[in-house]
Amino acid sequence: MLTEDYFMRMINQLLAVMTQILYHREAGRYQEAQVLIDQSLEQLLGVPPDLLRQMDDNSLLRLLTTQGELDPDRLALVADLYKLEGDLLSDQGKEREAELDYQRSMTFFLEIRLSGQDEGLYDIDQKIDNLHEKLSGRDLPIEVVFLLFDYFEMTNKYARVEEQISRLLEKDEQRLEILPEVIRYYESRLEQGDEELLAGGVARAEIEKRLQMVNNQFRENG
């Protein structure tokens, strides 16, 4: 059984490796940087790079989950590595591949934040916001949009929640499943004071208007 001391040593070693990755990237040595990323991911996840490239986000999350509990420290390192790989790919003009890495990195940071296991991990909100900005205007999977919806609601960024609601309501084939959650959200906001709503970037009149709109949509689609 691997001990906590072993994992701490591994994490510290990987933090040093990330510095080397950044150094290679700045020098334009992308292949050397990619090799270090592949080696680090294999060390963290115990899966060869070729197989990792075939796995989806949920499969990777399961590798870092024990008895229903995420390992937030290792997951944060994995998320950082995918962000670094995205930067490498972007530098080389491989924007579609970079986008997928940025999306995966953001998803993992969101999973940590929403799980409430981010204590001691710094700058996660800033990393999420930066990755969200990089993915601005992209057509994200509905699962990722829901994570962003929950994250921005949790952090009281209500204007950002509205962006996710607009994305969700574009999913016509799943509208009936989505509308009840949107209605719940607006009803919860109306329980708050005007100052709280304005601090989050929305006004009570806007919320009332949007709640009426989605209630009408729910009745029409029902």
Image (cartoon, rainbow, N blue to C red):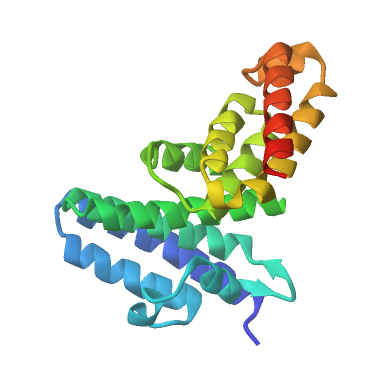
Residue 49: name its quadrant.
bottom left
Q: Residue furthest right?
A: 191
> Can I make out residue 88 in this image?
no
Q: Quadrant of the C terminus?
A: top right
Which residue is at the front of the view, 117 or 132? Answer: 132
**Foreground pick, 42 / 204:** 204
Residue 171 located left or right of residue 90: right
At x 74%, y 43%, the residue is 180
Tell me if residue 92 comes above or below residue 198 in the rendering: below
**Picture mark count:** 0
For the residue pair 98 and 141, the one nearer the viewer reads as 141
The location of residue 109, given as percent across then percent down, is 55, 52
Q: Residue furthest bottom?
A: 1
Tell me where residue 30 appears, x and y as whole percent.
18, 60
Left or right: 159 as drawn, with respect to 87: right
The N terminus lies in quadrant: bottom right
Instruction: Name the residue nearer the viewer: 87 or 138.
Output: 138
Q: Which quadrant would residue 192 be assigned to in this image?
A: top right
Q: Residue at x 39, y 42 (%)?
A: 135
Q: Position of residue 22 (x, y in %)?
A: 28, 53
